[in-house]
Image (tube, coloured by chain):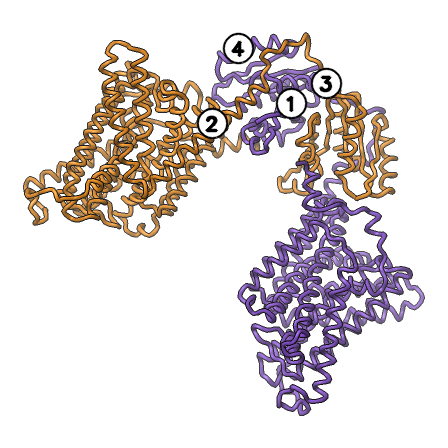
Chain colours: A orange, B purple
Amino acid sequence: MGLSQFKRVFLGQPLSNQMASEELIPKWKALAVLSSDALSSVAYATEEVLIPLAAFSVLAVGWSIPIALAICALLIIITISYRQTIDAYPSGGGAYIVAKENLGTTAGLVAGASLLIDYVLTVAVSIASGVEQLASAFPVLVEHKELCGAFIILLIALFNLRGIRESASIFALPTYLFVVSILVMIGVGAWKVFHGVGLHPVTVVDQTYAAVPLFLILRSFSSGCAALTGVEAISNGIPVFRQPSSKNAKITMLWMSGILGTLFLGITFLSHLFQVMPKADETGVSQLAHAIFGNSWLYYVVAGSTAWILFLAANTSYADFPRLSSLLAKDRYLPRQLASLGDRLVFSNGILGLSAAAIMLLFLFKGETHLLIPLYAIGVFLSFTLSQGGMVRHHLKEKKPGWMRSCFFNGLGAATTLCVLLVIAVTKFKMGAWMVILFIPLLVLVFNRIHIHYLAVGKELSLAGLAPPEKLQPFKHTVIVPISGIHRGVIDALRYSLSISSDVRACYVEIDSAATERMQVEWKRWAHEVPIVVLKSPYRSVIRPLLDYLDDVEQTAHGDVITVIIPEFVTKKWWHQVLHNQTAFVIRAALMFRRGKVVTSVRYHLRGT
Amino acid sequence: MGLSQFKRVFLGQPLSNQMASEELIPKWKALAVLSSDALSSVAYATEEVLIPLAAFSVLAVGWSIPIALAICALLIIITISYRQTIDAYPSGGGAYIVAKENLGTTAGLVAGASLLIDYVLTVAVSIASGVEQLASAFPVLVEHKELCGAFIILLIALFNLRGIRESASIFALPTYLFVVSILVMIGVGAWKVFHGVGLHPVTVVDQTYAAVPLFLILRSFSSGCAALTGVEAISNGIPVFRQPSSKNAKITMLWMSGILGTLFLGITFLSHLFQVMPKADETGVSQLAHAIFGNSWLYYVVAGSTAWILFLAANTSYADFPRLSSLLAKDRYLPRQLASLGDRLVFSNGILGLSAAAIMLLFLFKGETHLLIPLYAIGVFLSFTLSQGGMVRHHLKEKKPGWMRSCFFNGLGAATTLCVLLVIAVTKFKMGAWMVILFIPLLVLVFNRIHIHYLAVGKELSLAGLAPPEKLQPFKHTVIVPISGIHRGVIDALRYSLSISSDVRACYVEIDSAATERMQVEWKRWAHEVPIVVLKSPYRSVIRPLLDYLDDVEQTAHGDVITVIIPEFVTKKWWHQVLHNQTAFVIRAALMFRRGKVVTSVRYHLRGT
C-alpha cells in the first residue's frame, strides 16, 4: 500500500483550498463554533471559586458572590477591549500576530508560547472536567478518571487525524443544548428559591461576609478566571462570518459574553442558595442539577450536555494548536514542516504532540480538574495582556478616527488583564503556576534558536550578491558500483551507471580468492566494458576497503563528485527487507557526512516470496 | 564523528585475517582455552544431583554416589566417541557440520538450533552459578543475584564488543587456578576423612541405599548431566592446536575428561562424606570448602576461582554463538549480514542478542541455577546424538581403515546420548524442558523460511540461461528536480542533474502564486536552461502534485527510469537535521515501492550553526 493510500484510509480525503474557505456561516452558527471553549468553562469555574473558600471555612463560601461579580466585570472589560481588536484586524487578530506587529517579535513569541501551552491545558482541563461530570452521573467511572480521559483524548485525536469536516452543525447541537439546559436549570432553580421549595433550612437572607484573608479571596478569584479562557476565539475567527463580517463578529461576541456571564452568575448564585459545597466525587454542576431536578431525566440532560460541550472545547484546541504552530513555522520559529497545513500528514504531528502532552498532564495530575487549574489561565491572561497592549500601541501609531476611545478601552483591558495575570501568578505560584512561568521563556528560547538556525542556513544558501553563470556547469563525476557478485540487480545498477556517467568503475571486496576468480569469469561475459577493481580485505571487513578505495578515487580522478551506486532489493513483503540491503545501509551511514559523495540506490523489485 | 571512528573507539581495532590464524597454541594452553565450559560445570553439577534427592528424603542423598559414577561412565563413552570425530574432521567438526553432511540438512539445522539455544543457556546458567558462588562468600549479594548477573553479562558483552584478544594466557590462569584449588580441596578433604577430622558424627560407612522411586534417580541423573556440557569444545577447536593437531587434540581431550571426572567425583564423594545438603543461600562447593578449609584464605581462593571459571565459561558462548550463526548465515539459514565475521559491527548483533536473551532468562528464573538447569543439557545432548549419529553414517560411507571400531564407539556414543536425551526430556519436561523442546523446531522452521526466501531471490536474480548482451545498454532516463525555491543547494542539485542526464526538468509546487512569480524571475537568471514546471496544488499538499507529475512524466517520456534528485542539507550538528529534509524523507517513502524510480539526494553540507 502506497503512502497516499495509507493516508487516504487513515486520514481521510484532503480538504481543498476552495472547500475550506467557501463555508461562510451565520451568526448563530458562528457562536456555536467559536464559543464552546468559553461557555464550557462555567462547568468548573464556580466550583473552582468555592474550593479554596470552602477549605478555609463553611462561612467563607459567601464570598463567591462578589468574586463572581468581579469576574463578570472583568468579562465586560475584556469583551469591549476585544471589540476594538475585531475592528482593527478584520482578517483575524490572534495574540501572536497582534503582539508581534505592535510590540515586537519577542512579545509575539511570548504570546505564542503562552497560547501553545494553554491549548494543551485546555485539552487537559476540559477533558478532566468532562470526565468528572460523567463520573458524577455514573459513579462507576470515578476510579478510572485518567483512563477515561486518555481514551476520550485518543478518540478526539483520531477524529482529527481522519479530518472531521468542521461543520458548524456538529457544534450547534451540543452548544445550544448546553446553553438551554443550563438556562432551564437556572430558571427552575430560581422558581424553587422564590417559592422556597427544596431549600435547606439555613436562611439565605442573613448572609454576612465572614472575615477571610485577602490572599484567599484573590486565590478564589484567580481560579474563577478560568471562566474567561476562550473568549478571544471570536476575534480570531472573523473570516468565517458572513459579510459584514466585523460587525457580525462584534454582535456575536456580545451575545457570547452575555450568555457566558448569565450562565456563570446563575450557577454561582444558585450554588450558593442551594448550599453546594465542593465534593470529591461529584461536581458542583451535578450537585446543583440534582438539587433542582432530583434524579429525573432532566438531570441527565444537564450532566450529558455539560460533558459534551467540554469535550467539544477540548476539540477546538486541535484546530487552534496546529494553526498557531503553522504561523510560528511560517515565520521560521518552529520546524518548517509544520508550516504547510496542506497535507494532513503535517497536521498529524501537532495532533499527536498535543494529545501526548495532554494525556501526560492528565495522568500527572490524576485527572483532577482542581489540580490542573493552577496551571491554567496564566497563558491566556498573558496573551490577553500582550494582545491588548499591542492594540494600544496600534492605535497610537495609526490614529484612525475614534482612536482615543479605542485606545482607552484597550488600555483598560491591558491594565486589568495585567493585574489579573499578576494576581494569578502570585496566588497560584506554589501550586503549579511556576511550571508555566518557567516553561514560557524556555519555549521562547527554543523558538529563537530555531529562528537563528534557519536565518544562518538561509544566508549560507543565498545567491544574493553572486553573479549568475552563463550556463550551469555540469559536475564531472565518477561512478563507483560496489558489487558482491553478478546478478540481475547488478546488471540494472550497471546499466543505470552507464547512463549517468562515462567513468563507471565496479569494485569487489575479496573475502575468498576462489570466489573472486569465478566472479571475474562471469564479469567478462556480462560486463566487460566496465572496469572492475578487486579490493583486498586483510581484516575481512567489507566497508573499510571500500571507503579506502573511495578516498583513492577522490585523490586521483579529479572529478567534482563521486556517485556510489548501490544495487538494492525491494522485497514483496516488507519484513523480508531485514534479510537484505544491510551493506547499503552501512555504506550510506559511512558516507553521510562526507562531502562530494552522492549515494544512490538502484532498486531491484523482487516479485516473489 | 564518522562511523569508522565510532567503531574504532567503541569496538576496538579490527583483527587481521593473519593475526587470527597465526596463533597456534600448545596443548596445555589449548586445554585452558577450550575446557572452561566443561570444567566449570562441576561447580553446580553435584548440587543439582543432590537437590531432587534431598527434597525426597535425607537418606536418599546416598544415591548421589552411583549417579555420579554413571555420569562418569557416560563421560568416558562420549570422550571415546568424540575422539573418532577428531580423526574424521581434523578442521573441526561441530555438530551442525557433522549432522548436515551425514544426516542431511534438517538434522544439521536441528543440531544448529539446539546449540544456539544451549549457548544462551550456558551464559545464563554459568553466570547464575558464578553469582551464587560469590553470594556464598559475600552474603550481601544474595538479594541482588539477578542484578549482579545482568551486570556481569553486560561487562562480558562489552569486552566482546570491544574485541578482547582471545589470548590463551587470559584463560590459563583462572582455569588452572580452579583445577588446582579444587584438587587441593579434594586432597585436604580426603586427608580429613581418612583421619576423621571435622566430620559429623554420622557414620559414613554404614551407608545403605534408601528405597526411592526410579523417576527420582533418573531426574537427579538428568540434572547431573549438566556436568557434561562443553566437552565437545575440543573437537570443534582442533585448528588452534599445534601440529600434529588431531593427535594433540585427542590427547588434550583425554586430559580434559580425566580432570573433569576427577573433580566431579571428588566433589560428589566429599559432599556426601561431609554431609553437604543443598541450601538456598550457599552453594554446595562453598559448603564443602567451608567444611574443609573453614574461613581461611583457602576458602576464598576456591570460591573466587570457581566464580571466575564460571564467568569464563559464559564468555566462551560469546565466541561460539556468532561463529555458529555465521556458519548458518553462510548457508543462508540466517540473515546474510551475520555471515561475515569481518566487521566487528557484524558480531555485535550476535553479542547483543545473546546478552539480551541470557539476561531475560536470568530475570525470568530469578537468577537461580537450579531453576535454569531443567532447560539446560537438552540442546547439548540432542546435538551429541546427532553428531555421533552422523559419525556412524560417516564411517559406513567412508569405510576407512579401522572404520568398524570407530563406528562401534560412535554408535555406542549415539545410542547412549540418545537414551540420556530421552531421560532428560521426560524427567525435566514439566519443569521447563518443554520450552526448549518447543523452541528447537520453531527455530528450525525460521531457518527454513529464511532459506526458502534466499533461494527464491537467488533464482529470480540469477543470470543463468540468459545470453549476455553484446554491450550493456544504458537506461534512457529523465531527471526530475523538485524545488521549493532557488538557493545554493538547488544550484548544486541542478549541476549534478545536468551531469547525469540531458533530460532534466525542475518542478515547483505552487502554494502561493506571488511566490511563484518571484521564483520564476530568479529561475530565468540562474537556471534558464532547465525547464521548470509549476504544479498547482488545490489541496495545499506538496507531495500529491509531485507524485501525479511523476506519473505524467512516466506516461509521456518513454524512458526506462525516472531519477528524482532531491536537494538535501547536512547540518553541522546532527540534531539540527530535524529542521530539514522532511520533504525528502516523505518523497523517498512515497516512491519506495514504485518501480522505475531512482531517488537521489544531493547533499549540501552546511558550515554553520
- The residue to which callout 3 is attached is A475
- State whether residue B569 is above or below residue B261: above
* Residue at the image point whose x is 76% and y is 38% from the top: A544
* Residue at the image point whose x is 56% and y is 22% from the top: A457
Q: Is residue B215 visible?
A: no
- The residue to which callout 1 is attached is B565
- The residue to which callout 4 is attached is B518
Q: Is residue A442 visible?
A: yes
Q: CA distance from mark 4 to mark 1?
A: 23 Å
Which of marks 1 and 4 precedes in the sequence?
4
- State whether residue B80 is above or below residue A75: below
User: Do tags 1 and 2 sit on the same chain?
Assistant: no
Q: Few, some or many C-alpha atoms within 10 Å of disc 1 (few <14, some 14-19, many ≥20)? A: many
Dot 2 and dot 4 residues touching (CB under 8 Å) = no
Helix or strand or loop: what does disc 2 sit on?
Answer: helix
The numbered mark at residue B132 is: none
Of marks 2 and 3, the one in the foreground: 2
> Could you tell me residue A130's position as x and y percent?
30, 41
Q: CA distance from mark 2 to mark 4?
A: 27 Å
User: Do tags 2 and 3 sit on the same chain?
Assistant: yes
Q: Looking at this view, is A308 or A582 the one in front?
A: A582
> Could you tell me residue B142's position as x and y percent?
55, 67
Q: Amino acid at mark 3?
A: Phe
Residue A211 vs residue A158: left or right? left
Q: Quadrant of residue A245?
A: top left
- The residue to which callout 2 is attached is A448
Q: CA distance from mark 2 to mark 3?
A: 37 Å
Q: Looking at this view, is B182 or B432 the one in front?
A: B182
Helix or strand or loop: what does disc 3 sit on?
Answer: loop
Of marks 1 and 2, the one in the foreground: 2
